[in-house]
Image (tube, grey):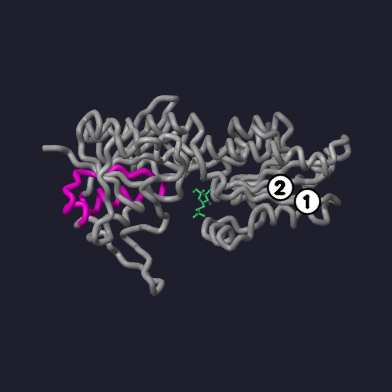
Amino acid sequence: MTRRIGICTGGGDAPGLNAVIRAFVKYGGGRLGWDILGIEDCFNGLLDRPLRVRSLTPRDCQGLLQRGGTMLGTTNRGDPFALSTADGGRVDRSLDLKGGAEELGLEGIVVVGGDGTQAIGLRLMDELGIPVVGVPKTIDNDLSNTDLTFGFTSAVAVATEALDRLHTTAESHDRVLVLEVMGRDAGHIALHAGISGGADVILIPEIPYDPDRVAAKILARRAKGRPFSIVVVAEGALPKGAPTDPATRKQRIRQGRGAAAIVMAQLEGRIQAEMRACVLGHLQRGGSPAPFDRLLATRFGVGAVDLVVQERWGHLVCLRNGEIGSVAIRDAVAQKFVDPKGEFVRTAIATGVELGADLPL
Ligand code: F6P
């Protein structure tokens, strides 16, 4: 009997999602002859009636490799165990999802998503008996147990290009330019792009910053005849002493009380300089994946087929020491943060970047 496998994409989109789908369909559908059903808008396609799924063949994947976003749609508000209702409440619709999967005769579902989506996938398997295989995704690169997630390199490239552009205008006007990049909980994008783009100051959520140190760096540059400065700040970065719990942080970001504005307010009165903020936002998530992400996403798609072939349900594809491997999803949903004592932070400090705290080299 032909195997029938579903695939869905969940959480915030990331460049490379389509490349995963394409590789999975080309290998699983094209070479192995499986029926592959694309589930629309993460798990929601299995909750709605009529069901929102579409059959995917290699022909449907033409031109997908370089296309950003996800052809299946996505949502970060689609937890079937606690779905939002119109009156602001929550309802458990997980049994409807199970019914939808059974109606379609799905043997299992490949779930492409970040920590939140993978945690839901695990519950589908543990509590409802729906077999899942995971593929990690996030531009933030903050998933443990995989060296890298696709989308990260593309986001870093966008942020680095932005820094290059900001440099020339900052230098022309002798200004302080503050670039805010994504990274609600983890500062990988800020740190990587900041080093690649030659930022003078990099501020990340993992290292609460001292505004006096940031001001001192800018003044020291001025004293050396460099009257402009570039600051990169992750959206989750805050001055020391500010509440850093995830819920407060998330609410602040959603309310638009941005990290760049906070940095500028902190510097006000500490330095005499013209300052401007640039919030890069979703530009980091849109557009074509960088070559590395196309390759990684394609390898992940092939790896997901291999896991289904081996019936290693409950496992997530990962990249370890440059090679595709797998890990149990329950061990993989923890977040990965920048290590303040790690090599990337050390590289920044060694090359004169200010991180807002007194860190040993
Ligand atoms: O998790 C990826 C991410 O890009 C975060 O860095 C950011 O805070 C969040 O998504 C933004 O999500 P949304 O698209 O819901 O605004």
Question: Which quarter of the picture shows residue 232?
Answer: top right
Are circles 2 and 1 on residues that touch, CB within 8 Å? yes
Upstream in the sequence, badge 2 or badge 1? 2
Q: Position of residue 97 (x, y in %)?
A: 25, 57
**Image quadrant assignment for residue 306:** top left
Q: Can residue 230 be spotted in the picture?
A: yes
Please tell me which residue lies in front, 73 or 192.
73
- Disc marking residue 178: 2
Identify the main secondary structure in magenta: helix
Where residue 75 sits in the image (x, y, percent)? 41, 54
> How busy is the neighbourhood of tag 2: few (under 14 within 10 Å), some, or many (20 plus)?
many
* Residue that appears at 36% across and 41% down: 331
Quadrant of the drawing holding the N terminus: top left
Near-viewer residue (48 or 60): 60
Residue at point 42%, 50% (across, down) = 11
The residue type indicated by label 2 comes to Val
User: Which corner quadrant of the image does residue 346 belong to?
Assistant: top right
Q: In which quadrant of the rendered image does the C terminus lie? A: top right
CA gap, disc 2 to disc 1?
A: 8 Å
Residue 122 lies in magenta, yes or no?
yes
The amino acid on which the numbered mark 1 sits, given as a three-letter code, is Met
Nearest the viewer among 49 and 113 is 49
Q: Mark 1 — residue?
A: 275
The crowding category of the residue bearing disc 1, from other C-alpha atoms within 10 Å (few below 14, some 14 to 19, many at least 20), is some
Asked whether residue 217 appears in the rendered view, the answer is no
Q: Is residue 89 above or below residue 157?
A: below
- The residue under the point 24% across, 61% down is 49
In the figure, is residue 23 to the left or right of 311? right
